[in-house]
Every structure is written in C-alpha cells, then in structure tokens.
Image: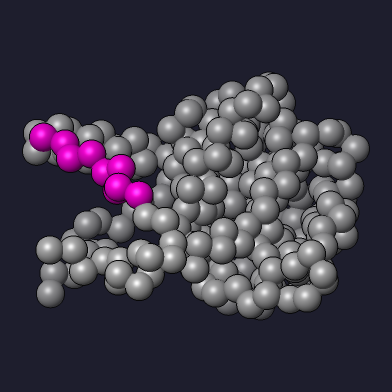
Amino acid sequence: VLTYPPPEIAARYRFVPHPFRRLPPDEMLRRAREFAALMASRRSSRVFSPAPVPEELIDLAIAAAATAPSGAHQQPWKFVVVGDNETKHRIRLAAEAEERISYDGGRMPLEWRRELERLGTTSDKPYLEVAPWLVVVFQERYGLQADGTKKKHYYVSESVGIACGIFVAALHHMGLTTLPHTPSPMGFLARILKRPRNEAATVLFPVGYPAEASLVPDLERKSLDEVRVRF
Ligand code: IYR
C-alpha cells in the first residue's frame, strides 16, 4: 500500500508515476561494469588542445549536470559558459595573479605545496586560454526573489558538488576532458562574469580535448577494499 505521498499533500499537489524502468539482472550487471570501466578511464587534464568543440556538447553536459538532486529541489546552480578569447584571457590573468600569491608568495602553506608537488601544478594556467571552453559553476548561496528579498537555500555545497560530479561524468562519457580548477580566492570570477551577489563561484572547468601526447601524473586510485567498508 502506498504511504507516499500523504493524502492531504496529494490533495494539494500533483504527483506523477515514477518513470523508473526495471532492467533484467544481466543487463544491470553489464551496464554497471561498463560504467565503472568508463569512469576508471577518466583522467583530469592540465594541457589542452585548442581544437574547437561544438557548443551543443557543452550544453548537453550542463543539461545532464542540472539533473542532479538538490536540497528541497532548489537547483542552486548556474553554469557560466565562456568561449570568447577576450574573457578567457581576462580570467587567465586574474587566476594567475591569485595563484602567484598562493604558490610563489607563500599563501599556500608548505604542507599544502608538498601535497601538490607530485602533480606538478604551478601558478601558470595556460589551459584557461587554450581550452576552447571554460565552464564556471556558481552556487546560489541563497535565492534572490523578484522583489529583491532573500530565500534560504539548503545543502547548497552538497547539491552543487553532485551536479559537478555529473558534469565531469557527462563530459568523459561524450569524449571530452576537463579539470576541476579552483583558483583561490575566486571572487574575481563573479566580477568578470558579472554574477549577482547571491552567487559564488565554486569550480572552474576548462573543457576540451587533451593536447596531443600530453602527460598525466602516474597516480593510483584507492581500491574498492580501501574505499568500501562492509558493515
Ligand atoms: N588552486 C591551485 C592549487 C591546487 C590545489 C589543489 I587541493 C589541487 O589538487 C591542485 C591545485 C591550482 O589550481 O593550481
């Protein structure tokens, strides 16, 4: 018997049949293996090709990301797509100015810099201009209603984090690559991209193809036994 939704709620709001489609067990296992293998082949890229990417692919990745579950279904995200060279150039200069203070000016503590050493990252961020697209994900820390009043948002970082995860997966699935880049502090992004005061930049994703013959760090992922605890 159905205990959801409560009848008094069903009387006031519309509910529709769950669109879930049950799959045969062998098909479930096949898909599960295929998706896990696909995701295992994903790597972040720090050297991009300037080869163009159709904007429709970026839109489709954002459409997938925006299906993420969110606190109270508030969908507290905005994806700002930047493809013009002038804006990319301004973003690169501003990001590198912050990163120089972090890396070279000692804002990043030694312990942190040591942790990053094997990734070979520096304050130089050419990919911010070379990648054909930059997608900056903003979180709506609160809602701004038409009359200018604020509306509280719930679980904003969790919601936007899930959306970013789906974005990364969608790009990989369609044959593109990215890097979750988090220049810090990143207030310059809201200024350059003219975002309203309720929005804060969360992650900047350069999107495109890896440069030919580019290298990535020889990292290992934790095994299932290291990340999964059976209770
Ligand atoms: N935001 C800097 C530093 C950086 C921090 C972490 I944690 C990384 O995993 C990688 C880099 C940068 O983008 O270089």
Magenta segment: does it hold 12?
Answer: no
- Residue 203: percent from the left, percent from the top? 64, 57
Which secondary structure is most common in the magenta stretch? loop
Q: In this picture, is 210 found above or below 66?
A: above
Q: Residue at x 62, y 34 (%)?
A: 59
Magenta segment: does it hold 21?
Answer: yes
- Residue 222: percent from the left, percent from the top? 30, 58
Q: Residue at x 63, y 77 (%)?
A: 152
Left or right: residue 4 compared with residue 113: left
Image quadrant where residue 22 sits: top left
Quadrant containing the C terminus is bottom left
Q: Judge by depth and name the residue closer to the eye, 155 or 137.
A: 155
Q: How is the image coloured?
A: one colour
- Residue 178: percent from the left, percent from the top? 57, 41
Q: Identify the residue at the far left of this view.
A: 25
Left or right: residue 146 compared with residue 28: right
Quadrant containing the N terminus is bottom left
Q: Judge by depth and name the residue closer to the eye, 180 or 162.
A: 162
Q: In this picture, is 218 found above or below 73?
A: above
Q: Is residue 168 in view from this perspective?
A: no
Q: Judge by depth and name the residue closer to the eye, 15 or 218.
A: 15
Left or right: residue 16 compared with residue 180: left
Q: Judge by depth and name the residue closer to the eye, 63 or 87.
A: 63
Q: In this picture, is 121 found above or below 143?
A: above
- Residue 98: percent from the left, percent from the top? 81, 63
Region of the chain picked out in magenta, as a range: 16-24
Q: Residue at x 86, y 34 (%)?
A: 85
Q: Is residue 225 in view from this perspective?
A: yes
Q: How many marks?
A: 0
Q: Residue at x 11, y 34 (%)?
A: 24
